[in-house]
Amino acid sequence: MRELLKKDLGRFSKNVGRRMLVGAGMTLACAFGCTVAAYAASSITGAGSTWVYPLVAKWSAAYQAKTGIQVNYQSIGSGGGIAQIKAGTVAFGASDMPLKPEELRAAGLIQFPTAVAGEDLVYNIPGINALQLVLSGPVVADIYLGKVKKWNDPEIAKLNPGVKLPSMYITVVHRSDGSGTTFTFCDYLSKVSPEWKEKVGESTSVAWPTGVGGKGNEGVASYVERIRGSIGYVEYAYIVENHLADARMMNRDGKIVAPSLKGFQDASAHVDWTKAQDFYVILPYQPGPDTWPIAGCTWQILRKNAPKASNLTVMKFFDWGFEHGQQMATSIAFGPLPPSTVNAIKAYWKSELGYGL
Amino acid sequence: MNDSDAVAQAGLRPASTVPEAPGRSWRLSGDFLFHQAAVLAASLAAAALFATVIAITIDSWTSIQVFGVWGFLKSSEWNPVTQTFGALPFIIGTLVSSAIALFFAVPVSFGIAVFIAEIAPSWIKKPIAGAVELLAGIPSIVYGMWGLLVFAPVFANMEPWISNTFGEIPGIGALFQGPPMGIGMLAAGIILAIMILPYISSIMRDVFLIVPSSLRESAYAMGCTTWEVAWHITLPYTRSAVIGGIFLGLGRALGETMAVTFVIGNSNMFSTSLLMPGATIPSVLANEFTEATTKLYVSSLIYLGLILIAITLVVRFLAVLLIRRLSRGEGAST
C-alpha cells in the first residue's frame, strides 16, 4: 500500500504540475486571445453541437488559411452551446434542435441553419448484406417500441419479399448520451407513429421503452457489430466511413430509397425555409420521390445585442462557408444549403439585426 | 534555558555545530509558519468539500422543489421529454454494480494477499504485488474500452452458459435471464471488480505482513494449515484494516464513471436480470450532461450528484460504525 501510495503521490504531483502548466498556458492564451479579440476581431469562439463539429472544423481551417481569422469551435453539446450563447460567453452557439421562436424572442437570440445531414439504421443480421434490408417508419417505430420482437415478424417480411429473415430476437440499440442524432431520429418516429409521439416523444434524450444504450455513434456501431440480431441508428457520415450494413427506407412518397446526400438535400429543398419563422423547420419525413426520410440540420445561434463586429465576423464566416465550403461539406457527408435558403438567411440577418453583410 | 547554560553548551561543542540559541525569533516563526500552513492545508480541503456540497445543493434546488426528496428517490421515471425525473433506477444500479464488484474483488484480494503474505516464495512476491498495483494505474477510460471491445465479446459467449447454469435455480434464476449481449450490470460489476482489486488487495497484503510472526509461527507450530492461519489468526488480527480497505474499494466503485458507462448498457429501465443493461448515477451524468437543455433537467442531474455524495457519506459512516463494533467485540473476547 505504501508503494501504491507513493506511486499515486508521484503521479498526482506530476499531474498537478502538468495541470498547473496547462492552466498557466491557458490563462496566458486567454489573456492573449482576449486582447487580440478586443483590438481586432481576428478570432471568434463558438460552442455547441457535436454533430456539426466536423463541418465547422473543416470550414474554419480553410477560412483561417484564407483570411487569417480564427474560428474556435468547442463541441460541448447542443445544451452547452445554448447555455453559453445565452450567457454571452461565446460569439455563436450551435444546436441540433432549433429553439422555438418565442424562446428566441425571450432570450434576444436569432438562429439560422448550417447544413443538412442524415442518419440511417444499421443492423447485424447473419446472411443479410448492406442495403438489402428495407424498413419503413412505422416498422422502425414498432421495433423501437418493443412491439416487433423478431426479425421474421410479418411487418418486416412484408417489406422484404424474397429476403430470408431469420427467426432471431431483435436487440434495439440507441444512443445513451444526449444527442442531436437522437432528436432527429425520435422526431421522425413521432411523425410516422402516433403511438411513439404519445408514449416517447422527441428530445435529445428520451425514455427508451426498450434496448441498450451506446455512447456516441461509435458506441452504437460497436454494439450493433457485436450483438447478433441488433439494430441501431447512426449518422450517415459515420456509416460511410466505417462501411456499416445500413438499411434502405420507404419514404413519405412510398418509394424505397438508399441514403444519399441528394436525398438529404431533397429533404431540405421541400421545406420552404423562406416562410418558416426563425427557420424553425424540422427536416425528417419530408415529401419527394428521392427524399431521404431521416434528415436533420444544425442551427447556429447569435445574440442580437452582441457587439456588431462580433456578429459580423460570425456571419461572414458562415456566408463564406455557404458559398465556398460546399465541396468540403459534401466530402464529409453534409449537404450544403440550397442558394434560396442562403438568400433567406441573409435577408433574415438584415431584418433581425438591422445590419447585413 | 539561561545564558550560562547556553555558554556551557557552546563550550562543549565544536563551533560549527553550535545551535542557534533558543528563543531566536526565526526559529519560532518557522514553526509558526509551518503550523499555520498545515492548518490552512487542512481547512482548505474541508472548505472545498463544504463549498462543493453547498454549490451542488444550490444548483439542484430547482429539482428539489419540483420533485421533493422522497418523491425523487422513489420515482423510477426518467423522461427528458416530459421533464419528469426520478433517481431510483440509478441508485439501484449504482448499489448493485458496486455490490457485484465487491462480491468478486474481496475473495480474490484475500487470495492475493494470503498468497503474498503466507505462501509465495520471496522472489515472486514483488513482481506479483507490482503487477496488481499496476492495475490501479490504468486510466478508467482504458478499462471501459477494453471492457467494451475485448471483454464484452468474450463474455457474450459465456452468458448462454451462465443463464443455462444459474437461470434454472429457483429464487436466483431470475437474475440470470436474458439475451447474451456481453454488456450489462454483471459485466459492469466484473470490470469494476478488476478496477478496485489493487486497492483492496494491497491494503490486505500490507496489514497481513505486519501480523506478528510470533502469532503466526505459534499457530503453525500447533499444526495449523495455511488456511487456518489465514482465517483464524491473520484475518481476526487485521479485521478493522481489512474492512477499511474493502470500503475504500467500495467508495471507488460507487463513483466510477467512464468504465461503467461503456459496459453497463445504459438503460434507464428496471430489470431483475443482471445480464440486462442498467445505469448508474455517474454513468447517467456522463451521458446526459452535455445535451441537457432545460434548467430542470440540468438541476435534476446535479441532484443525482448530490445523492451520490450522500450515498458515499452513508457508506463511510457504516464503515466507521462496523469497525467500531468489531473492535469493541475484539476487546470483549480477549
Image: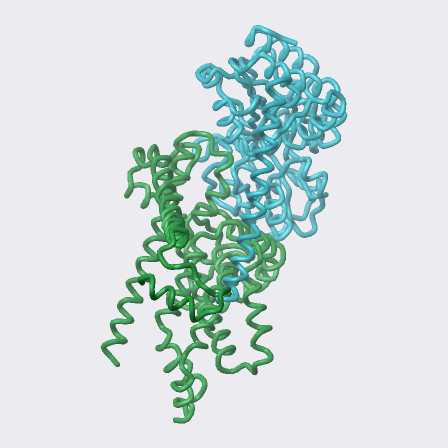
Q: The cyan chain is which one?
A: A
Q: Is residue A134 above or below residue B145?
A: above
Tell me the quarter of the picture where residue B235 sits. Answer: bottom left
- Quadrant where the N terminus of chain B sits is bottom left
**Along the line of sight, which residue is nearer the eye, A315 or A68?**
A68
- Quadrant where the C terminus of chain B sits is bottom left
Percent coordinates x, y for residue A351 in the rendering: 57, 6
Tell me the quarter of the picture where residue A307 sits. Answer: top right
B167 left or right, relative to B55: right
Q: Identify the residue at image location x=57%, y=61%.
A: B155
Looking at this rendering, what residue extends furthest in the left direction?
B332
Q: Identify the residue at image location x=70%, y=51%.
A: A127
Can residue B89 be seen from the camera position used here? no
Please say which color scheme the image uses. by chain
A10 left or right, relative to A342: left
**Along the line of sight, which residue is nearer the eye, A256 or B226?**
B226
Percent coordinates x, y for residue B115 in the rendering: 51, 78
Percent coordinates x, y for residue A352 in the rendering: 55, 9
Q: The green chain is which one?
A: B
**Along the line of sight, which residue is nearer the eye, A302 or B263?**
A302
Percent coordinates x, y for residue A78 in the rendering: 54, 30
Q: Identify the residue at image location x=62%, y=55%.
A: B149
Give the mark count. 0
Q: Is residue A142 above or below residue B195?
A: above
Q: Identify the residue at image location x=76%, y=22%.
A: A66
**Along the line of sight, which residue is nearer the eye, A42 or B69?**
A42
Can residue B75 be seen from the camera position used here? yes
